[in-house]
Image: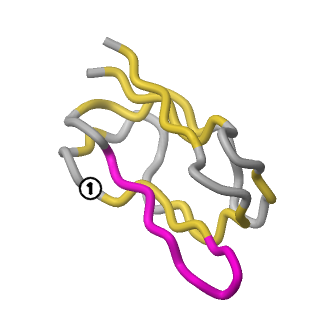
Amino acid sequence: MTTEIRADLSANVWKIVVTEGQVVAEDDALMILESMKMEIPVYAPSTGTVVTLAVKEGELVEENALLVVLDA
């Protein structure tokens, strides 16, 4: 099953902490977004493998932008 993780708000991609192909557990941090000087962690909703990182560090993303694709 493939899961798309999308941005909840417009933000800057401050730090990506996973790589494509990496196996993550539920609630592992995938990346940290920054908006209005607040850091917003993005967590894995389930255990799986990172198939696609759709953004790069420093990129500005809009609300609902695709961030990560996980394969469970």
Q: Which residue is mark 1?
A: 28
Q: Please indicate whether residue 47 sits to the left or right of residue 6 in the image.
A: left
Q: Position of residue 22 (x, y in %)?
A: 35, 41
Name the main secondary structure of what is drawn in magenta: strand
Residue 43 painted magenta? yes
Above or below for 71 versus 10:
above
Above or below for 11 versus 45:
below
Residue at image point 80% right, 59% down: 60
Secondary structure type for disc 1: loop
Q: Quadrant of the N terminus?
A: top left
Q: Quadrant of the C terminus?
A: top left
Above or below for 24 versus 1:
below
Q: Position of residue 56 (x, y in %)?
A: 71, 53
In which quadrant of the rendered view does residue 21 lie? top left
Q: Please indicate whether residue 53 sits to the left or right of residue 42 in the image.
A: right
* Three-letter code, disc 1: Asp
For label 1, count other residues whose C-alpha is less than 10 Å away and answer few (under 14), some (14-19) or many (20+).
Answer: some
Q: Position of residue 17 (x, y in %)?
A: 45, 62
Residue at image point 79% right, 58% down: 59
Residue at image point 41% right, 34% down: 50
Residue at image point 64% right, 71% down: 14
Above or below for 7 versus 34:
above
Q: Please indicate whether residue 1 sits to the left or right of residue 68 in the image.
A: left
Q: Which residues are magenta?
A: 34-44
Q: Position of residue 42 (x, y in %)?
A: 44, 57
In which quadrant of the rendered view does residue 53 lie? top right
Residue 36 painted magenta? yes
